Amino acid sequence: RTLFLEPYRNNIVCCGFVNVRLEEEKPIFNKQRIDFSPPEKINHFAVCNNQLCMSLGKDTLLRIDLAKPDQPNQIELGRKDDSRVHKLFLDPTGSHLVISLSTSECLYLNRNTQKVRSLSRWRGHLIESVGWNKLLGTETNTGPILVGTSQGIIFEAEISPISIVLTQFHFLLLLPDRVKAICTLNGQVVYEDVFPDKFGTLKKMIKDPAGGLVWIYTEKAVFRYHIQREARDVWQMYMSMNKFDLAKEYCRDRPECMDMVLAKEAEHCFQNKRYLESAKCYALTQNYFEEIALKFIEAKQDEALKEFLLKKLNHLKQSEKTQITLLVTWLTELYLNHLGLLESAEGKHGVFQETRDEFRKFLSSSKHKECLYNNRTTIYDLLASHGNVDDMVYFSVIMQDYERVISHHCQHDDYSAALEVLSKHCDEKLFYKFSPILMQHIPKKVVDAWIQMGSRLEPKKLIPALVNYSQMGSTQQVNETIRYMEFCVYQLTVTEEAIHNYLLSLYAKYKPDSLLLYLEQAGTHASYIHYDLKYTLRLCAEHGYLQACVLVYKIMELYEEAVDLALQVRIFRLMF
């Protein structure tokens, strides 16, 4: 074999022409590093007709016209889910790019546009290959193409953007014989307009950026599209996507639509066990009150039920008195049940106090004061049935039902607290009603309160309370009774005969020295005397106060009787 190759080796070496040619030829394959540093990891890559497309990272597409490599074009796919680019397919003209996603969806991007659009009819297929039409494909139309899926399915399709116009919520596609409007929110075709052949081939679609009108011209005609109330159904689309805040934003001036959105949001929250949020939404709807309340009751969600009732109550009109009464009563019962559970639970003192504060805020609500006042008997009964004395007293004060508060204090032997309420609110009728029992237990404080009230109290209406305890009471009660009567006579200058007669009876029984002093100070002129002379004479005679009797006889101008009695008094004194 060595001998066979040797002649050829010699020939190559000897032939100068061949040697020179081989030395000048360059390698068939020559590698060149492109001066380009991608901002993110390159996932997929396609190039045709000097148009280079590559997928970067998760959501970025980079296009480079190799004739203008210094002007790269970057496009965001706008995907918020976990989908990634599976493959890129670029047609021979470099005009049509099909983007296959890992979620079995497909996107399309035309060389002359910046907006990718979803190929909704291709959804559900993972595209693995595309057979382009080299004969019929143009820059605006792919012509019939073959598409192969991961399941081995091959189908025929055609993609044909003549023009595309983007509006607030739609994009309009100009096809060879029609216009399609596709919603950008859900990818659904909402409008399709077919042009008759008589107008010729559709050429282009343009949007006036100032006026907002869309213009289309054909070979033989010009058309104009008006876009009116484009957002009219947007609320419904956002609602179906569970984007309730956006849905409400687009139906603020349509109450019937807002009600549907709120009901759907409430039901969505309820199904996801977000009961408090559900309650707040349900309260704003026109749904049947009983049905909603029953939902929370069956789910054993008392807190959510309370929230629903509170929100519903706050949105009722003042004229809806029956519903207001029902809700106020129901809420009171719920609060009391909750407070009862918290009070008996260990480690719940903080929550109990917060709930009590919330309940008291509810009871003191100025908005529902009329309802609470008109139904205060029912509220009192509920409070009493739960044994909630503290809140009953609080409610009584709010309702200015001081009689109930004072009665409560008296029943619990807290007479000072009862008097404090009396003194604070200065209700004369309550003074007359409760003074007898208070006088029995705290006479000095009671008389101090009477004196503080001054002329606002009628002393004669207090006499029944004074008579009972001055006759059988302690020395302190008697002294305090006398103190108040003296205040009436000497400070208030009361002229009523009953008051003066009563004071004289007290003097006669307990302070005889003061009796004579009073009579002397009262004077001897009948027009300035405010006590009954005959009653006083009889009173003094019964107690043996002869000197006082002499003074009364003198005032009555019964001088003979006065002298006779005076002589008796003098003889009595001389004898003893």
Image (tube, grey):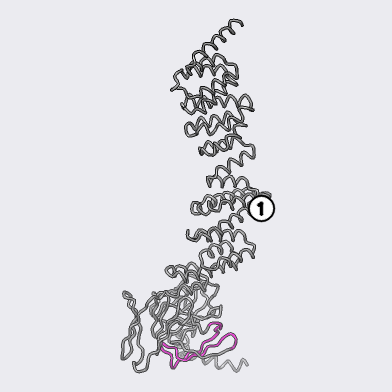
Q: Nearer the viewer, residue 237 or 526?
A: 526
Amino acid at pointer 1: Leu
When the figure is inspected, residue 366 is found, relative to residue 187, above or below; the finding is above
When the figure is inspected, residue 124 is found, relative to residue 445, above or below; the finding is below
- Would residue 201 be visible to someone looking at this image? yes
When the figure is inspected, residue 89 is found, relative to residue 56, above or below; the finding is below
- Residue at 59% over, 54% down: 332
The x and y percentages for residue 524 are 46, 17
The x and y percentages for residue 502 are 55, 26
Q: Quadrant of the C terminus?
A: top right
User: Would residue 196 appear left or right of 554 to someone viewing this image?
Assistant: left
- Magenta span: helix, strand or loop, mainly? loop
The x and y percentages for residue 326 are 56, 59
Q: Does residue 21 show up magenta in the picture?
A: no
Kindly identify which residue carries mark 1.
341
Q: In the image, which residues are magenta?
A: 123-152
**Res 151 quadrant in image:** bottom right
The x and y percentages for residue 63 are 44, 77
- Residue at 56% over, 8% down: 570
Q: Nearer the viewer, residue 238 or 502?
A: 502
